[in-house]
Each structure stands twice: as structure tokens, then as C-alpha cells.
Image: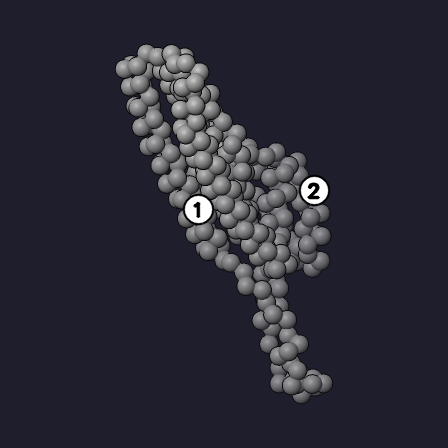
Amino acid sequence: MGQDELYQEAAATYGAALDRLASAYEADADKRRDLGQEIHLALWGSFAGWNEQCSLRTWVYRVAHSAATSHVIRQRRANAQTLVSLEELEHLPDRSRLWQNQSVEAVQMSLEEIRQKAERFQKTIRNRNLREYVAAAFVFVGFSYFMWRFPGTRLGAGLLLAGTAYVLYQLHTRGSAKTVPESLALGTCLEFHRRELERQRDLALDVWKWYLLPFVPGLLAFVAAPLMHQPPEKWIGTAPVILLWAAMFYAIWRLNKRGANKLQRQIDELNSTNREGL
């Protein structure tokens, strides 16, 4: 379904619930009507970037809560900018403590700042994936040559090529970059960026499953092929190679673990920014 059809379905199914949500966020009747319009506008715009990564119900409530959060932030900023008249200042009990008693407005990121962060992050993902695709091309060329030049390595080389194909498939389906939709409001743009950070964080944490383990059968078969023609006492000679592979696997895991921790810190920063404005 298209953007308009998705919005119409969501509005028809969850319209009453969205009205109740607006009432929970805004007590003033006029402002509540404005909030309802903001929620529906944000919901319509969000479907330009929806790819069924979650249920329709979950998406609708995410967008609605984000739009309502943005509304509350704007209202509090507007209230904080209300000036006190000179007459009111004369009746303040302790003018010397006026500045100390004022609440400090939390620093909030604008829509453009969030969008720029999201676009830079997606560019980083594209560059990472490009490097992986180029490396995979060299793997395909190199081990295809081994299969042709050394028939005894065909099993190991074939398994390594299959593992490489699996890694590329996982990278494309789970780790591909996305285009930041142009029509997102502040709350939905924040949610989009947070969701992308979480997706890449989870991919890095699962690096053993989708990136490293697929190569293990091919590597073992690649080493075992020449050992079949050697006496067992010579097998110890492969230990340095196996230890080198283990060290490389560990280094890759550590780098991805560090990257996942860095992404988690960015997620926590976004969550903190969102909470401080409430």
C-alpha cells in the first residue's frame, strides 16, 4: 500500500486511541486539537519511510508519542520565554534570588541537527559496506583461482565462497544503509535515527554468528586438505596458522564489540536528550 492508504488505514483503526493520547498530553482544548493535527500529520509523513520493520500498531504509537513529545517540548520552551513585567518584579519577595530559582531549559537538538546526524551515520554505513563488498570481490577472485589451480582445495575454497556469499547476504539484509526520509518531524526523525543505531548495534553484537562462524568450515577444510597427505606428526605445523586465524577472529570481535558500545552511548545520548525535554 502507498503512503496515503497506510495513513487512512491507521487513522481509521487507531483514530480514537490517538485522540485519547492527545488528551493525555494536552489539557487545553484548543492546544489539544492542534496536537491531534500534528500527530496525524506526523503519522502521514512517517509512512514514507515505513518498511514494515514493526507492526502497524507499534509504528503508529511510536510516531504519536514522538509527535506529542515534540509538542510538549515546544510548549515548555514557549512558556519559559514568557517575560515578567516590572510591576510583577516589584512584588517578588526576593528579587536577588530570581535567577537562582529559574529552571534551566535543557539543551535540545533541532530537527536539522538530528537529520544531519542521521545522514552522517548512514553515510558511514554505506562506506563500511562498500569496503566489505570490495573485500568480498577479492575473496571470490582469489579462492576461485585456488579452486581452478589446486583441485585439492576445492572443498575448502567452495565453503569459503559460500560463507562469503552468506556474509554479503546478511550485510545487505540486516546492515544496509537507509535514506533518511525528507518528511519526518522532529520526534519521528529522532526515532528513525535511534532505530538505525539500535539495528547496527545489534548487528555488531552478533558478529560471531553472521560474520565469523560462516568462514570456519571453509577454513578448516582448506587446512585439512593438505594434511590428508601428511603423517600426523606433521600436523602440528598448522598450529601457527590456526592460532593466527583465532587471533584475527578475536580482534574482529573486539572491534565490533567496541563499536557496539559506542553506538549504545549514542543511543543513550538520544534517550537522555529526549527525556530532558519532558
Q: Nearer the viewer, residue 152 or 8?
A: 152
How packed mark 2 is, by other alpha carbons closer than 10 Å (few <14, some 14-19, many 20 or more), is few
Does residue 210 lie above or below 115 as drawn?
A: above
Horizontal and vertical percent position of residue 11: 62, 39
Instruction: Identify the element where label 2 is drawn.
Output: helix
Residue 47 position (above or below residue 273) = above
The front one of 15 and 50 is 50
Mark 1 sits on what residue? 121
Evaluate whether residue 71 shows in this view: no
Point out residue 13 in the picture as x, y percentages from the top left corner: 66, 36
**Viewport quadrant of the C terminus:** bottom right
Residue that sits furthest to the bottom in the current view: 90
Which class describes the residues within 10 Å of circle 1: few (<14), some (14-19), or many (20+)? some
- Please report the residue visible at 71 percent of the width from the left and 47 percent of the height from the top: 20
- Position above or below: 248 against 223: below
* Residue pictured at 43% horizontal, 35% vertical: 248
Instruction: Check disc 2 and report the residue beneath it.
Output: 16
**Percent position of residue 163, x then y:** 43, 23
| Residue name at image x 43 percent, y 52 percent | 116
Given the image, on which type of amino acid does mark 1 rest?
A: Phe
- Tag 2: residue type? Ala
Residue 79 quadrant: bottom right
Query: Is there CB contact under 8 Å for labels 1 and 2?
Result: no
